[in-house]
Amino acid sequence: MRESWRWFGPNDPVTIEEIRQTGATDIVSALHTIPTGDVWTLDAIRQHQELIETSEAGLSPLTWSVVESIPVHEDIKLARPGHEKYIDNWITSMENLAECGIKTICYNFMPVIDWTRTDLNFKLPSGAYALRFDQKKFAAFDLFILERENAEAEYTEEELSEAKVVFDAMSEEEKTKLTNNIIAGLPGRMTDSYGLEAFRTMLGNYKGMTTQDLRDNLFAFLSKVLPRAEAMGVKLAIHPDDPPRDMLGLPRIICTADDLELLFKAQPSPSNGITLCVGTYSSRPDNDLPAMAKQFGPRIHFSHLRGVSRDKEEQRSFYEASHLDSDIDMVKVIDELLNEETRRKASSPDGQIPPEQHIFIRPDHGHQMMDDIGKTVNPGYSGIGRLKGLAEVRGVIRALSATK
């Protein structure tokens, strides 16, 4: 497997020089300054690639190998009239990336909001800080800050009461912070950041859309993209919805193994694959991650190796745990990924896996700890916490590889 590290560009507090010191060989990045729906030009891609891959003589090389992500325009998800131009632009961006040798592309199909957390500085018993999703706080936002139409129908009487208690106890500053965490944009998100009124408007655009409607729109998008991906040797790796369940009246469609089965039955192209985000899938207790890693092994092109710890009383609430200390058995997941790499090697004519055929892995959402506490960091993407995660995962890989 290829060890990678996410880099947000020149403004990332973790520099390319620091990433090189981690021992990672590959970079996961994107052109975050290009508006959603616009083409990623060859010049823009090459300029970003040069920032990553140019180094002094004698230093370990880094390669931009994975894109996370090319954003999918909301008009595509809504199948609005004229949305085809945005599909064409997405395909052109993909082809330009492939021409530059970047052929693994992570993307998602989450409507309106991308990955979502309520707390960006949840203090752990160790004194380090983690990201957290608190269902009661999220309900308080939905019901009493956003005041979404008919939202109360989606909650039990007990949940309504609990959310009101949480809301009443919040200061104005806490309400503003919670709102910003949910709608103003977390690092790496591939949807726009909103004000409250614009957010309500965007949610209203999906009124009446069913899960099947959104799934059909994804399949229609892929029916246009996948033939070109196959022709260019590109591997698409869809990221699950995070958290993986319906939220704010919006349907979510990549949440479980059953969802993936439907995806591959509808679009069986070998270029149609997944990002196995262990933490996202494991925030649902009904997802068996080692089993999913085994079942979908040939479709896994990229993996975020992190886990979560779910609250015992409220399983929809969780915090980002240490990479090896979560609710899932990370060792078994890694073992299944190594088994898949062994199968790929055995099926290769020369017994070697081409670079783009490897499973790319990266540590994800590390804790803010040690000297990073108090620094300006992208939430979830501090340097030391991810380095700790990478070291732990690397140790598991080395130990398991020695027994194969």
Image (tube, rainbow, N blue to C red):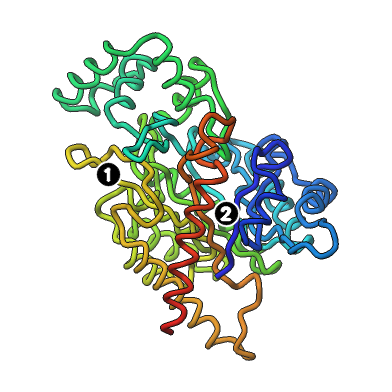
- Residues marked 1 and 2 touching at CB (< 8 Å): no
Kindly identify the amino acid type of the residue bearing the numbered disc 1: Arg
Q: Which residue lies at the image location 57% right of the left edge and 58% below the top edge? A: 223
The disc, 1 or 2, on the residue closer to the chain's N-terminal end is: 2
Image quadrant in which you'd find residue 15: top right
The numbered disc on residue 234 is none
Instruction: Please identify the residue farthest to the left as the structure is shown.
Output: 158
Position of residue 231 measured from the top left corner of the image (x, y, whole percent)? 69, 69
Mark nearer the viewer, 1 or 2: 1
Which labelled disc corresponds to residue 106? Answer: 2
Q: Residue 119 at what x, y percent from top left?
A: 40, 29
What is the distance, in whole Å, between disc 1 and disc 2 at their CAs?
Answer: 26 Å
Count of residue discs: 2
Q: Could you tell me which secondary element the residue under label 2 belongs to? A: strand
Residue 150 appears in the figure: yes
The foreground one among 381 and 271 is 381
Quarter of the image for residue 5 reads bottom right
- Which quadrant of the structure image shows residue 163? top left
- The residue nearer to you, when weighing 362 against 18, is 18
Q: Vertical placement of 48 versus 378: above or below? A: below
Residue ID at (29%, 49%): 284
Crowding at dot 2, Cα within 10 Å, few <14 / some 14-19 / many 20+, comes out as many
Residue annotated with mark 1: 310
Give the amino acid at mark 2.
Cys
Residue 120, x across and y down, in percent: 44, 31
Q: Where in the figure is residue 232, as x and y percent of width and height? A: 71, 67
